Amino acid sequence: MSHTAKTPEQVRREFREAGVTLTDWARAHGFNRQTVFDLLRGLNKGTFGEGHRAAVALGLKAGRLVDVKAFKPPPKLPRSQAPSGGARQRKAA
C-alpha cells in the first residue's frame, strides 16, 4: 500500500473544513499542542518520540507506531555476517 504524506497546508485545510481546532485534536489524541503546532510550522521534523507519533497521526509522514515499552530493535549481526559498510581495507605489504 502506498502512502502519500500530506502537506501541512493540507492538514490545516482539513481541520478548518471539519471545524476542529488543533488544540482540541491534540488533547483528544494525547499530544502536546505545541508539538502539533511545531510540526505544522516545520519547527519539529517528527523524527522521534511524540513528534514522530503526532506526524504519523496527522498524515504528515509515513511511519509505524509502536509501543515503546514492547519495542525491541533487531539483533546485531555477528561481524562475519555484517555488511562491509565500504570501509577501506589495507593491503598486506
Image: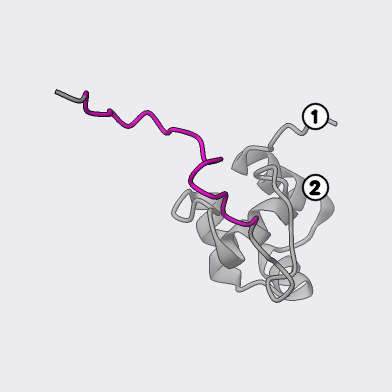
Instruction: Tell which of 60 and 19 is nearer to you.
Output: 60
Q: What residue did someone put label 2 on?
A: 17
**Residue toward you, 15 or 84:** 84
Q: CA distance from mark 2 to mark 1?
A: 25 Å
Tell me which residue sits at (62%, 57%) in the image.
75
Colour setting: one colour
Depicted 2 relative to depicted 11: above or below? above
Identify the secondary structure beneath mark 2: helix
Residue placed at 42% from the left, 33% from the top? 85
Residue 39 belongs to magenta span: no
For label 1, the SS is: loop
Report the residue at 64% width, 53% height from top.
55
Question: Residue type at mark 1?
Answer: Ser
Q: Main secondary structure of the magenta part?
A: loop
Q: Which residue is mark 1?
A: 2
First to last magenta residue range: 74-91
The amino acid sitting under disc 2 is: Glu
